[in-house]
Image (tube, rainbow, N blue to C red):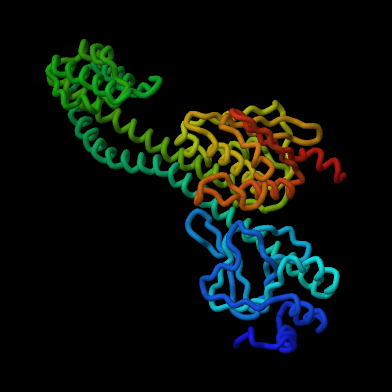
């Protein structure tokens, strides 16, 4: 259909079939036709470019248009409007510029009402205005739902990446230790048979036990550097060679806590072939214990991460407001972001007032607040930066301050940081939704947020009602 060749009366009749505006009186539909112009778009045409002022209200007569946002992984469709919908600038809307390009998905026809007529529309078309106000509210709810979904997906992506990184180290340690353990068990079995065949005296067996205890010593502080470890192994190899023992055992002994003094002590009681038997038994046996300990430590690390994730997401609890252990939530959040902090060599310190009361809110939402604020602070830091988190009473509420020593927020943009889609990060690294989501979640938890920033110090201050204050108010 060639919409541009329709008469005004025919176009008014066509609007009677429009899903959104069809119920409006004929005289109001006629007003729209008289003050609008028919536009035809080809597939791929941009109706309103990102950042440009919205030119007016768009009544879609045929086809469809959509708005796309770059969430960091390419363009994703946020909303779509089809024939029968109305979009663009609506009565009482505070929309100034779209957050992304609005693009025709197929040949599309719209009735374009220039923005200069919006005030007159409100005055002269009461039924249309009422219809469009409801349309605007529906659009706001749709955008809000889309924003929350996008931010949750981004948080889930960060959480998954951090968790995968954190789990990779203990999983690799378990795999490596389990592979070595099989070989060491075989060596320990053979060495134990040889030791039994050596027929040592009680005094010699006491010396063997002392060596074993020295090998299993775990009070050594710190970890040797690769150079220090190589030197330690060389000293052990030299000692073994000097005592007529195969110096190939040195690598197994070097992995334990054995010292030259411990070796001297056992050599004073045992010599000859029996000494080499004892050394092989000690090296293999202590390696088995060390590898088993590494597997246990790695498994405990995995268990701790799973506990932290469950605490962070509260996936095993109902999403209802309840008394919340604030410090536990902060601890779980920091555990989730630990790999990112280590990657930037950043220090995170938590300072809490003794006897801090629980807060009242939605656990998962509170953890998302802390995650977004701490994650943003990490993004702002240079290598070796620092984040201080302080929690203290504030009357009937609890205040949490998250402070970083990054470059600060420029004065020119400080008032816009909570606006939807506003971001200072490079393209593809931020949606501009994080702080908007934080603000919404804080309001949902009956809290408040303020920010103060200057070069070298940025502080976000969040206050949440204390649980005892909430119970007192409801009693």
Which quadrant of the view contains residue 210?
A: top left
Q: Quadrant of the N terminus?
A: bottom right
User: Is residue 473 or residue 375 the one in the foreground?
Assistant: 375
The residue positioned 54% from the left and 37% from the top of the image is 378
**Taking 321 as reference, is 256 above or below it?**
above
Q: Residue furthest top?
A: 268
Hey, which residue is sitting farthest right in the picture?
475
Is 356 situated left or right of 277 in this image?
right
Query: Against 232, is 163 above or below?
Result: below
Front residue of 22 and 311: 22
Tell which of 266 and 374 is nearer to you. 374
Q: Position of residue 326 (x, y in %)?
A: 67, 37
x, y percentage for residue 16?
75, 85
* Residue 450 placement, left or right of 244: right
In this rendering, the answer to whether 122 lies above or below 148 is: below
Determine the residue positioned at 69% across, 35% down.
Answer: 461
Q: How many marks?
A: 0
Quarter of the image that includes the C terminus: top right
Q: Quadrant of residue 67?
A: bottom right
Determine which quarter of the picture holds residue 52: bottom right
Left or right for 4, reference 200: right
Question: Where does the image place residue 13, in percent across and percent down from the top left?
Answer: 74, 88
């Amino acid at each position: 259909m060639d919409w541009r060749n329709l008469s005004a009366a025919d176009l008014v009749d066509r609007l009677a079939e429009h899903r959104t505006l069809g119920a409006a009186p004929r005289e109001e539909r006629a007003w729209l036709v008289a003050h609008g112009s028919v536009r035809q778009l080809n597939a791929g045409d941009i109706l309103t470019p990102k950042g440009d002022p919205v030119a007016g209200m768009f009544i879609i007569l045929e086809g469809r248009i959509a708005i796309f946002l770059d969430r960091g992984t390419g363009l994703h469709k946020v909303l779509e409007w089809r024939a029968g919908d109305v979009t663009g600038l609506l009565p009482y809307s505070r929309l100034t510029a779209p957050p992304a390009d609005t693009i025709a998905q197929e040949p599309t026809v719209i009735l374009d009402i220039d923005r200069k007529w919006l005030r007159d529309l409100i005055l002269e078309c009461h039924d249309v205005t009422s219809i469009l106000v409801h349309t605007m509210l529906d659009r706001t709810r749709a955008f809000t739902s889309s924003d929350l979904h996008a931010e949750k997906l981004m948080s889930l992506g960060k959480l998954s990446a951090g968790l995968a990184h954190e789990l990779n180290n203990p999983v690799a340690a378990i795999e490596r230790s389990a592979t070595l353990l099989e070989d060491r068990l075989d060596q320990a079995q053979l060495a134990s048979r040889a030791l039994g065949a050596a027929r040592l005296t009680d005094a010699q067996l006491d010396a063997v036990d002392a060596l074993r205890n020295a090998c299993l010593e775990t009070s050594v502080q710190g970890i040797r550097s690769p150079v220090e470890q190589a030197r330690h192994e060389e000293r052990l190899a030299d000692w073994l060679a000097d005592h007529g023992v195969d110096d190939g055992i040195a690598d197994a002994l070097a992995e334990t806590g054995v010292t030259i003094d411990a070796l001297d002590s056992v050599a004073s009681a045992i010599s000859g072939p029996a000494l080499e038997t004892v050394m092989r038994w000690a090296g293999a046996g202590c390696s088995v214990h060390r590898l088993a300990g590494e597997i246990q430590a790695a498994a405990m690390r995995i268990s701790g991460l799973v506990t932290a994730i469950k605490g962070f997401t509260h996936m095993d609890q109902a999403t209802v407001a309840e008394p919340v252990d604030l410090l536990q939530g902060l601890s779980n959040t920091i555990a989730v972001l630990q790999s990112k902090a280590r990657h930037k060599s950043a220090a995170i310190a938590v300072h809490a007032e003794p006897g801090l009361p629980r807060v009242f809110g939605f656990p998962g939402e509170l953890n998302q607040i802390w995650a977004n604020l701490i994650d943003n602070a990490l993004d702002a830091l240079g290598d070796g930066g620092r984040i201080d988190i302080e929690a203290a009473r504030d009357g009937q509420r609890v205040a949490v301050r998250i402070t970083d020593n990054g470059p600060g927020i420029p004065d020119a943009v400080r008032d816009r940081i909570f606006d939807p889609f506003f971001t200072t990060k490079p393209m593809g690294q931020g949606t501009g939704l994080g702080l908007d989501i934080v603000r919404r979640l804080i309001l949902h938890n009956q809290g408040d947020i303020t920010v103060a920033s200057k070069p070298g110090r940025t502080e976000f201050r969040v206050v949440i009602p204390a649980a005892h204050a909430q119970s007192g108010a409801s009693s």
